Image: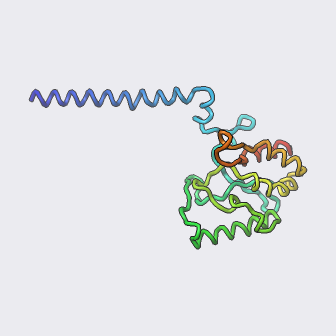
Amino acid sequence: MNTLVRQSLAGLRVLLVLTVLTGVLYPLGVWVVSRVPGLRANAEGSVVEVDGHAVGSDLIGVDPVAKDPNHDPWFHTRPSAVTDPSTSGGSNKGGFDEDLVAAIKERKVAIAEREGVAESQIPADAVTASASGLDPQISPAYAELQVPRVARENGLSEEEVRALVAQNTDGRGLGFLGEPGVNVLKLNLAVQATKG
């Protein structure tokens, strides 16, 4: 009986110590680190605000929908592999999958029609979904493809819109990692601010 009581008390002590460590101290430590200047915005979801109202996150790409598809004033993100915007994920289809090849062909036709260009001019990121389906950035080539339409529909010159694209283009990480990218949300907000 004495051994059972000692083992039960030892187990209870371990439970209490681990509860305090993992249930109180660790979450508190994570919260404190998230308040360090420079990390707070990332910890809060990198929310982009306009006039005190949240309009999105610069880490999550959401493709804007034009009220009138024939007069589309927005830059568009990469396509998503998912149809429900509350989820993310890739299609996990190989490059020779018939469904994927057909989807890419459909996207090329739609983008060529929207932008008034030949299908051969459309960059790969315009028609291929990312692994998450929520990329906030597009390639500078895809942004350049959209410049004439966005300029025309917003009453701006192409030079003004190209300058906004350049201002919202991020370089390579650490100067050599990845490719430059254009943040679509920030670019669309800049276009609307310039227009207004």
Residue 188: x percent and y percent? 77, 47
Picture colour scheme:
rainbow
Residue 63: x percent and y percent? 69, 54
Q: Is residue 76 above or below residue 53?
A: below
Q: Is residue 16 above or below residue 115?
A: above
- Image position of 8 (left or right of 44): left
Q: Residue 170 appears in which quarter of the rendering?
A: top right
Q: Residue 37 appears in which quarter of the rendering?
A: top right
The answer to which of 177 and 106 lies nearer the viewer is 177
Residue placed furthest toward the front = 176
Q: Is residue 11 above or below residue 172?
A: above
Residue placed furthest toward the left = 1
Q: Residue 103 appears in which quarter of the rendering?
A: bottom right
The answer to which of 132 and 54 lies nearer the viewer is 132
Question: For the N terminus, which image quadrant?
Answer: top left
Residue 130: x percent and y percent? 61, 56
The answer to which of 135 and 153 lies nearer the viewer is 135
Q: Is residue 174 above or below residue 142?
A: above
- Image position of 155 (left or right of 93): right
Question: For the C terminus, which image quadrant?
Answer: top right
Q: Residue placed at 42% from the left, 27% from the top? A: 25
Report the label total: 0
Residue 30: x percent and y percent? 49, 30
Q: Residue placed at 65% from the left, 41% from the top? A: 173
Q: Residue placed at 75% from the left, 35% from the top? A: 51
Q: Residue placed at 64% from the left, 51% from the top? A: 135
